Amino acid sequence: MDKAGSSEIALHLRTVHFSLVLICILVGFSLFGYSSSEPNAIHQQFEYISRIQKNWMTWTKRFGTEQIKWLKDQGLGWPDTIKSEIYIPSEELTRKNLPQRDNGWTARPLYSPIYLYLSVNLASGLRHEILGLGWPREDETEFIPGGYHAVGNPRLDTIEEFRQFWNASNNVGAFIVKDISEVAYAVSNGEVKAALRWIPSPKRHQGPQLKLGRMNIGLIEVGDYCKDIKELLTSRWSPQFNVLFCGQVPPRLNEQPSQILVLPARYKDEPVPVNLRVWLADHFKFSSAGGKFEETFPELYDFVKKNPQMRFNDVERLLHSELQRERSSEKVEFLGLRFRERDLASWGAFFIVIVQIYLVLHLRVLSARSQVTDHVFKTAWIGLYPDCFSRTISLLTASFLPVAVLFYGRVQLGFSWPVFILLALGFVLSIETAKLLWRLPRQQANVTSSHVEPAD
């Protein structure tokens, strides 16, 4: 190729290089503008809390298993002798002359032997937000997240409920049952009818399946059917017991009254040192966490504070409408064309990769043909300048800048396979660009030395 042809390639490379830098800057600003606008910031924060709500059953199981293992390893108490179910045989019911005695009673003390909870302050008083229930199973821990098997619903249907949960999540406690009374009590019509001996339940039985709710002694009843239980049984249990498990026995047809089964137990509370807010931020890859809801999600809080009881579905629909209205109105002009900011942010990775491919193709041609003449190295393009500063700037702008913008787009737009594939392709192209640019000064030295006359 003649000198003119080589110079034309170099001049064309200068234009392509400049175009690549320009489009990277433009796409970078579009991504920044897209992510920093208020509706998009609100939407991103809403996406964070939606992932926590929608994946409640998954992350609570992981968190609960980790924390229970920690409690056990620290020797803070793991009640592996506490049974998840108790069984009152039909013979015992017959001996006490109680109805519902055909197959005995099988009872499960809920939240036993250990559960994790949050203390949440509401206008109506204090309630425990159940995270999950755990019990030993052979050599591992079985953990049932809250909201399943009647452990207690997470109750995060509204933004306000999530806010209360989030603000209490730096103070997770563990309720650990240490001992259960060997005697359960049958109560009917406000009277103690019988003290019943129970045995561990070896298998599932056909009789009534009782779920016993937890009631601390001295607190209000968990249901109307447990009213005044404490006063009825005060003289019957050992002072070591400080909690009651109470549940109603379903009556048979035409049978009145129904019975209430009460099981005294002893428990202790242990604090869990892990800050759940920080744990959730790490688990879901949030940018920041640790503060209260109002500090961590400020735009979302301002958006819903006039109506905090909005349900997640309602907030999602409202945000979708806001985003659609904003995206349809925002325009960016590039090369005489007008793009919506969202479209440019989304398609920017594709534009960058196309220009990278074009740049690599021309660099390869120049690399193969520039050995013929050194005239091409006199072209006014920074990629051909021999000094260290120029070489560094050309490598940064042609190799590092495209990858940085592609990665920034991946962070702002979230994961999707097209974005990930473009990021991987852009990374490969940047490495190839860096190699070709790095060889040019060496080729220039070789060409120059080949034209020097040998000394006499």
Image (cartoon, rainbow, N blue to C red):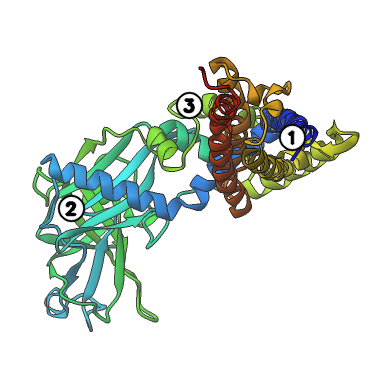
Front label number (1 vs 2): 1
Query: Which circle's residue, 1 or 2, is located before the other in the chain?
Result: 1
Q: What residue does disc 3 label?
A: 292
Estimate the x, y position of residue 262 in percent, counting from the top left. Answer: 23, 58
Residue 6's mark? 1
The amino acid type, in three-letter code, at marker 3 is Lys
Foreground mark, 2 or 3, reads 3
Q: Residues within 10 Å of mark 2 (few under 14, many from 20)?
A: many
Whole-percent x, y for residue 272 in the image: 26, 36
Amino acid type at circle 2 is: Pro
Q: Which residue is mark 2?
A: 264
Q: Does residue 185 lie above or below 233 as drawn?
A: below
Callout 3: SS = loop
Query: Gap in Å between the C-alphas at discs 1 and 3?
Result: 63 Å
- Ranked by sequence position, the earlier of labels 2 and 3 is 2
Dot 1 crowding, Cα within 10 Å, few <14, some 14–19, many 20+: many
Who's the residue at 9% across and 60% down the image?
A: 182
